[in-house]
Amino acid sequence: MSLLTVESLRKSFGTLGAVNGVTFQVQPGEIYGLLGPNGAGKTTTISMISGLLKPDAGTVKIGGTAFWADPQRARRQMGVVPQELALYEELSGKENLEFWGRLAGLGPREAKARAAELLESLELSDRANDPVKTYSGGMKRRINLGCALLHRPQLLLLDEPTVGIDPQARMNILEFIQKLRAAGTAILYTTHYLEEAESLCQRIGIIDGGRILAEGTLSQLQERLGGDRLFVIDADFTNTVPENWGAFLQRFRIIQKSERQIIAAAIGTRDPSECLKDLLELPVRVENVSLKRPSLNDVFLQLTGRNLRE
Amino acid sequence: MRNIFTIGHNDLRLFLKRKSAFVWLFLIPLAFVYFMGFANRGGNDPSNRKPEVLIENLDTNFLGRVFMDELSAQNMSLLDPTNRGTASRIIRIPADFSAKILQHQQSKVEFLKRNGSDEANAAIIQLRLFRALIAMNGHILEVSTGSDSNGPLTEAALRGVMATPNPVKLKASFAGRQPVPSGFNFSLPGNLVMYVMMNLLIFGGTTLASERNNGVIKRMLSSPVRRMEIVLGKIYGLLLLGLVQITFFLLVGKFLFHVNLGANLPGVLIILMAFAWVAASLGVLVGSLLAAADRVSGICVLASLLLASLGGCWWPLELASPALRSVALFTPTGWALKALHQLISFGSGFEVVLVPLAVLLSFGAAATWLAARYFRS
């Protein structure tokens, strides 16, 4: 059974539809990535799942029970890591963990023991008693993550937990999240970093304009573009349009086009050498043709016509 | 309930970790109490002043002891010889005090001056000594002329007469208006009320505004904690902070400025805690209504100064115009001070401050309701 089920979730702020019918599920031991640019509706979706916002329509089920049927029970099952560093900077890492542990329902001794355990796991034991304001960005992010884990939640909601930190610190956090997944935690992970979604998530939902545009494993999403390769054609396309290139548009789907470059995917299962021959016969002076594996950005590009990083 | 305590205790810890807290909770208020007390010193002493007098009882017989009890009943603080330094006057009961009276002879009690002592206190002691002497003579006369007048004058007979309620009682009160509190008796309650209001508004407002801005409140709301528990936890934390400041003020008032806190300290504490509840709830309300922490500070300072001036923290309302006194009735500071002056300066019983207490509790309930109503993440 899915630990988190989101069905047809909708939320508007005035006339702006922030989330427009989002549906997905997260299984135990799975990291589900919600990938989209800023303003795509990721945080609004997480806010509705964690009960910070009431949806206009749709349902959120935690462990099969509707969230709003028993919000306190649902909250006890989940841990939420907000995008902001929601910490008390004047308190030490240990004090922060103990405080959030107490609010999560642990007794004083249990909170203390669990805080010590998490400080060890997060490799922060040596700085446990220092005020958080003296920590580096990466250390703060780790404590921010730890504060959601005191009560060993079955479901973890991570809202862009690696924003603004260096690659090494990001790597540490991602490794830690992998360990949580391996221990059976269901994780919803929102990000606008392609690499994180590609390397971390078992399934990915691409979200934009409050809608899930595509969903699946990385390879399933790549399949949408016609397999595991894309053709990058460098040429001067200023005074020509593909519609005039004979059967080109029947054989290729254009993912991106600029005056100097076209990225295209072959339609159907065709041999790459055949495809290359087609491309070299185009009525333009081709300067270079290369092959690349489709990325999530290419998928996003194909779905929205925009780069994820725009 | 547990979450309320957890949030409140955490907030108190956070408040006390700020260095500025010590300045605003302790240093600045202390300076203001001193300077305002100095500026407001005057001839009007509180009616319940209990001056300290040293008693040298050289009489070993019972009449010396009975006379000391008479002195004590006249509201004087009797010191033993080890505390000689603080006494304003010395009363010496001669060794033959009992013997002479029992032989129907006159005995003279000595009233000795101490150089450099407080003259106002000395005058009160002199007056009360006269009253004690008149009462003592009256009781001896009553025993001597009563139904058992043939027997000797005994301690039991004398104490029996003393324990009998007086058939005629004199109730003295100020004609016209109330006496005006002055000196530290005025500045201590005034500054206590002003700084409790100011600090709870500022600490409550800024803390909530910054916790909302950095996502802490959202995080709390996504924890298994109810919204009302967060509001009450925040108010509870501020109440604890108020208690710290109240305790400090009362200790400083008692031991540094020698303010007589009256006979009803629990009553004073109840009034102050009710007032702190109002201030704490208003602090949470301000933090919910205003977004920027720096704006919160400015508005809270202005609001608390306005409430302090309208409520009579800066000047005795007894000296203010009737219009200003009417305005004070709409402020929690005014009601708190009214009750505190009754308990501290005028020596009133708790029953006199029940109405101000009820008004403060109403203010508190309304402010808490508004704080909960407008609380946002």
Image: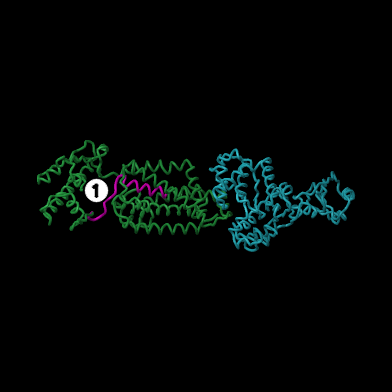
Chain colours: A cyan, B green
Residue A69 percent across, percent down from the top left? 60, 63
**Magenta part of the chain:** B174-197
Q: Is residue A176 visible?
A: yes
Q: Disc 1 marks which residue?
A: B75
Q: Quadrant of the C terminus of chain B?
A: bottom right
Q: Kindly identify which chain the residue marked by label 1 belongs to.
A: B
Q: How many marks?
A: 1
- At label 1, which amino acid type do we have? Asn
Crowdedness of circle 1 by 10 Å Cα count: few (<14), some, many (20+)?
some
**Residue A120: quarter of image:** top right
Residue A180 percent across, percent down from the top left? 68, 48
**Residue B194 lies in magenta, yes or no?**
yes
Comparing B268 with A39, the one in front is: B268
On screen, residue A6 versus residue B117, left or right, reads right
On screen, residue B185 versus residue A282, left or right, reads left
For the stretch drawn in magenta, the main secondary structure is: helix
On screen, residue B315 versus residue A172, left or right, reads left
**Residue farthest to the front, as pictured:** B151
Residue A251 percent across, percent down from the top left? 86, 55
Q: Is residue A310 visible?
A: no
Residue A88 percent across, percent down from the top left? 55, 45
**Residue A249: quarter of image:** bottom right
**Residue B55 lies in magenta, yes or no?**
no
Element marked by disc 1: loop
The answer to whether A5 is drawn above or below residue A107 in the figure is: below
